[in-house]
Image (tube, rainbow, N blue to C red):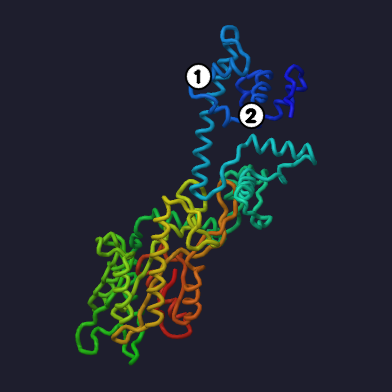
Amino acid sequence: MALPDLDTAEGRQEAISLLDPDFHGMMERKGITEVLQATLSNAGVKSIGIYSVIGETAADIRQFATDHCNLDRGRQVVAIAGLIDLWNACKTRMVTRHKAEAEAVSSAMPPPLNKTEAQDLRAKFEGLHYRLEDKVSPSIGTLESLFEQMDSGELKVMSLVQFLSKEDQEEEPLPSEKADELMNENTDMWEALEAAMKDTTVKERYFLTPAALDAPGVSPPLGHEKEHKGEARADQVTGESSDSRSACADKDATGKRFTLKVLYLFAGAERKTSVVHYLARLAEKQGWALDAREVDLKRGREFDLTQSQLQDSILKEVEQGLFHVIICTPPCSTWSRVRMANRRGPPPLRSKEHLWGYPWVKRQFQMELELGNELVRFSIRIWETVAGNPRSCDGFLIFLFGEHPEDLGRVEREEDGLVLFPASIWQIERLRALVENDCNNIFTSHLSMLLGCSMEEADSAACHSRRDQAMGSPRMACF
């Protein structure tokens, strides 16, 4: 194919039209003449990437300017300086672009789309068809997602709600005072809060996660009317043994003081505000002794719950019914939906479609993913063992407490509104079967209900949930 004739204006325009839009735009900003732009195009230098590696030093660019662009070093110094300036800008641009693409790939996110390319794509569409209004023109984020599917050769079925328009993306939010007026006009505070909590995205992003990660321990309520709040709650945690003995008895069948035996898995570091601390207070009020076994890697290397020998030992003890209360709260780091909320934090490693992790997870995140999988699988084995052996060796129903973030459905990414579907352990078939097949002895509650409660209030909430059950007393609490 013959190269365009650079001696004519039409030929130069034809050569320039073959340049990448972002490269052409950069040359325009640097003041590169039309003749030089066309010359570079005919020389095969049509992109920022190619020009950024055309030489390693400024001397190489000077040599390129004289050999391939027919510039004279003595008389056209300014033009050569412009090409060197362009080369420096291209190098900087490519370093930034490569870094952004690498971060996108490592976090399993679509690579960023150059705005100049998007504008050129829109211009070509309008030239062939019709003018696009912003309300029907796809946003940059939508195009990034589509281009990633095309590059990988894996086109996915997408619903219309997943396509965000440019107008929606660039729409300015209401001033805060106007938003307050719209949300709270003629309403009581409790009604406004109730309405806000129905929005699962707002609830997760701005309430649950910040509260769970950043909130200090809840202080006791002030006021004389609440000084003795919770003191009589322990007698409500009743439950009965197979021979109708109360679990709240001060003494066991031998006449000795009753000892409440607790197993706390994933207990974290030792602290005064732990669950065991409050259980000790409740047991003391009830006249019981407390024997609590707390297991966590932070307590010592011998408490590493990824070790199969330790897992088997604990499972055997649970099967033998050596505990009255079992608390099993596996970490939720890799299961958190907040990883999909924006691109500012650690990348998502799993989704609803890939519950146990993306097949393409990079090596640097593989260990974190496998750790999250192993601990959740072990927790499910604990819960299943209790379901199969519901009573302790002395005949009491075992109270099992498990906690993990609820499944709130889809999440829209902040930057581009892309709809994603996070993973949740409540989507795992083994766990769903455990809850659904044993619903009479299991109650569920929301984490948000307990975030602002003291331990006594949380205990009361559990008791009220228990009394609402149609049969028996609870032995598993799922949050």
Q: Nearer the viewer, residue 449 or 320?
A: 320
Q: Residues within 10 Å of mark 2 (few under 14, many from 20)?
A: many
Query: Mark 1 — residue?
Result: 58
Amino acid type, label 2: Lys
Counting from the top left corner in percent of width and height, residue 478 is at 44, 71
Amino acid type, label 1: Ala
Q: Is residue 188 among the parts visible in the rendering?
A: no
Counting from the top left corner in percent of width and height, residue 105 is at 51, 46
**Residue positioned most to the bottom:** 243
Name which residue lies at 49% across and 38% down: 99
From the viewer's perspective, tell me whether residue 46 is left or right of residue 56: right
Give the quarter of the figure containing the C terminus: bottom left
Q: Nearer the viewer, residue 473 or 176?
A: 473
Query: Mark 2 — residue?
Result: 46
Residue 456: image quadrant is bottom left
Counting from the top left corner in percent of width and height, residue 66 is at 59, 15
